[in-house]
């Protein structure tokens, strides 16, 4: 099973992806986590990405597409994977289509977690407070506002993009965590 989880920062993509990892034994591919690991390890990509991430902007399409392409080839992705935080632009979505075609793979579904923007700030503030070892560098008011505007401008168009392919399902992300989880499982059963 190969799927995309689409939604703004704070929508719960990471939490729901973790549930799916446990339930279905597929891999979670979070480009945000991969980039944060690169920053922590001070790799060339990490050094380049840090400042961009800290201010809430997007790292270049080329860099993230390269990271995802390499990651998809790893053995733990053989049973499938959840793309969490990728694609984030139409150009990334097009690159993903091409990449999967070259690898002889296809997407099964795209699940949108639909949430009211008003609650995102509260959720992210809460996440920042609960993060072990301190909040993420981009969990502050300024970077968050930027991340939300970047989402609206660059990522939201993907809803139309995937709607056009017939792959898109929308789940109400305002429900409780367990209800969202159950709604996602319903979508996954429908496509199985
Ligand atoms: P996330 O953990 O998904 O919220 O991502 C944190 C930050 O990493 C984002 O604000 C971007 O700076 C960067 N990032 C993660 N995924 C992507 C992507 N697909 N394209 C560009 N930048 C990304």
Image (tube, rainbow, N blue to C red):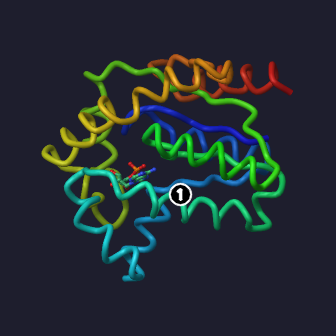
Residue for badge 1: 65
Mark 1 closeness class: few <14, some 14–19, many ≥20 residues within 10 Å: many
Between 179 and 47, the one nearer to me in the picture = 47
Considering only vertical position in the picture, is 53 above or below 5?
Answer: below
Where residue 179 sits, quadrant-wise, is top right
User: What residue lies at 19% left-to-right and 55% top-to-bottom?
Assistant: 55
Considering only vertical position in the picture, is 16 above or below 180?
Answer: below
User: What residue lies at 63% left-to-right and 52% top-to-bottom?
Assistant: 28
Q: Does the residue labelled 1 lie within 8 Å of ligand 1?
A: no
Where residue 180 sits, quadrant-wise, is top right
For label 1, the SS is helix
Q: Which residue lies furthest to the left in this view?
A: 142
Residue 94 is situated, as x and y percent measured from the top left of the image, at 56, 41
User: What residue lies at 37% left-to-right and 62% top-to-bottom?
Assistant: 132
Between 191 and 25, the one nearer to me in the picture = 191
In the picture provided, is 82 more to the left or to the right than 14?
Answer: right
In the picture provided, is 61 more to the left or to the right than 184?
Answer: left
Residue 99 is situated, as x and y percent measured from the top left of the image, at 67, 52
Residue 125 is situated, as x and y percent measured from the top left of the image, at 25, 42
Residue 11 is situated, as x and y percent measured from the top left of the image, at 42, 32
In the picture provided, is 96 more to the left or to the right than 7?
Answer: right
Q: Assign the C terminus to one quadrant of the image.
A: top right
In the picture provided, is 71 more to the left or to the right than 139?
Answer: right
Q: Which residue lies furthest to the right in this view?
A: 192
Where residue 178 sits, quadrant-wise, is top right
User: What residue lies at 77% left-to-right and 41% top-to-bottom?
Assistant: 106
Q: Assign the N terminus to one quadrant of the image.
A: top right
Disc tally is 1
């Amino acid at each position: 099973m190969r799927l995309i989880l689409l939604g703004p920062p704070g929508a719960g993509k990471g939490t729901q992806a973790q549930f799916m990892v446990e339930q279905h034994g597929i891999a979670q591919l979070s480009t945000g986590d991969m980039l944060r690991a690169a920053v922590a390890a001070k790799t060339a990509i990490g050094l380049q990405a840090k400042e961009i991430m800290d201010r809430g902007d997007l790292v270049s399409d080329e860099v993230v597409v390269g990271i995802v392409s390499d990651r998809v080839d790893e053995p733990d992705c053989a049973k499938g994977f959840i793309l969490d935080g990728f694609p984030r632009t139409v150009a990334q979505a097009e690159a993903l289509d091409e990449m999967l075609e070259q690898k002889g793979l296809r997407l099964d579904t795209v699940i949108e977690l639909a949430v009211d923007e008003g609650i995102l700030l509260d959720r992210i503030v809460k996440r920042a407070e609960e993060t072990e070892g301190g909040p993420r560098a981009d969990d502050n008011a300024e970077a968050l506002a930027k991340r939300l505007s970047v989402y609206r401008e660059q990522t939201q168009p993907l809803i139309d993009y995937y709607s056009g392919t017939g792959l898109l399902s929308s789940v109400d992300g305002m429900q409780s965590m367990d209800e969202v989880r159950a709604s996602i499982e319903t979508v996954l059963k429908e496509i199985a």
